[in-house]
Image (cartoon, coloured by chain):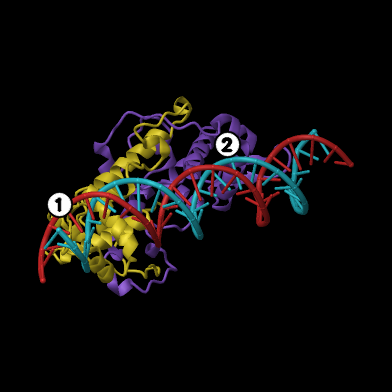
Chain colours: A purple, B yellow, C cyan, D red
Amino acid sequence: MLRISRLTDYGTMILVHLARRSGQVCSASDVAAGTHVALPTVQKILKYLARAELVVSVRGAEGGYTLGREPGTISAADILDALEGPVAITECSQIDSQCELESLCPVGSAWQQINKSIRLALDDIKLTDLRGPATEIPVAALTRSIGRPLARQPRS
Amino acid sequence: MLRISRLTDYGTMILVHLARRSGQVCSASDVAAGTHVALPTVQKILKYLARAELVVSVRGAEGGYTLGREPGTISAADILDALEGPVAITECSQIDSQCELESLCPVGSAWQQINKSIRLALDDIKLTDLRGPATEIPVAALTRSIGRPLARQPRS
DNA sequence: GCTATATGGGACTATTCTAGTCCTGATTGG
DNA sequence: CCAATCAGGACTAGAATAGTCCCATATAGC
């Protein structure tokens, strides 16, 4: 069903890594070593995150990255925006889309509302909530669903 | 951000079309004409929906499709399951995935919980809610967000 | 029974998207 | 200066998606 890209998944791991090293400047290599994601991929993701100001970069030797804000103020929605851009749940939920079927299609607005509701939920989930392995996610609907963490695909 | 496939979007339109013709048997051509989605695509989607028993098929001349259940009992989650299969928000939220990074990755379980919460929300959204252009979606978080329907991309 | 009209199932292709890599230039500490 | 490090973007390979088509099966009507 609904999916986030693998880069977003990595990006979350990377931000969690930085949150744990809060204050310290970490180079891309540090992060790659800490997260076991391939270095070029880490570099790419950090660039996206820097552009979205979720991380702050320090150039030059001994440079690297730190979190751009407090972990409690970075939400899952922020991460998605930074790494997946303004893509929406359906093509017609995008701001700039134009569709000749609009008048024929009674469904679009409903999906758009669903989209917004999901965004609201993701806005409430902060980096601090993602940090631990068995944290409770602070969204009403989530409280009912606590499952054992499943395995993750090998990657790199 | 989070996305559903275009087929799912079409599928919803198709189900809404059938709901409006409730009782009547509609052929794939009828549906294509009514939704302005290309016929071969409609045929493909109806096959998937039939396999998931969301629609019932009548074979032979004068055959076609009707809804398999009452519109009020078909949820957005049902449609996603029928048309996108058991895909999950991240690869590691899938039942059969195996990941060597599990112990290193503190994030996975959080995304899985988010995934479940979204599913719960989608379970509450029924075909009857999708039917009209400006319907209120019956999920708590959704009530705050009512926007003007946006345009839809041309497709066919 | 024959024929026209439908669906059922699956193969196939083309296009788009994604992930991942690499190169070149700019910045800065030692 | 030199080595380390980020910035930006080009590029490739692979996977996923959308869309089309073919052939078998079923059935209504004549």
Q: Is residue A89 visible?
A: no
Question: What crowding class fits label 1: few (fewer than 14 Cα within 10 Å), some (14-19), or many (20 or more)?
Answer: some
Q: Residue at x 45, y 25 (%)?
A: B103
Q: Residue at x 25, y 67 (%)?
A: B29
Q: Which image quadrant: the C terminus of chain B?
A: bottom left
Please give the label number shown on residue B73: 1
Q: Can residue B54 be spotted in the picture?
A: yes
Q: Amino acid at mark 1?
A: Thr
Instruction: Provide the residue designation for mark 2.
Output: A23
Q: Residues within 10 Å of mark 2 (few under 14, many from 20)?
A: few
Rendered residue at 38%/39% (across/down): B111
Marks counted in the figure total 2
Q: Chain of mark 2?
A: A
Badge 2 marks a residue whose secondary structure is loop
Query: Residue D21's spot in the image, x, y percent?
Result: 39, 60
Quarter occupied by residue B65: bottom left
Residue B57 image-quadrant placement: bottom left
Please state if C8 lies on the left or on the right of C23 as rendered: left
Query: Compared to B6, does A24 lie above or below?
Result: above
Compared to residue B28, the image places residue B82 above or below, namely above
In this picture, is B116 found above or below A152?
below
In the image, residue B92 lies at what x, y percent? 41, 35
Query: What kind of element bears circle 1?
Result: helix
Q: Is residue D2 above or below residue D8?
A: above
Amino acid at the residue labelled 2: Gly
Instruction: Compare residues D3 and B7 and report the one nearer the observer.
Output: B7
Instruction: Let me know if marks 1 and 2 both belong to one chain.
Output: no
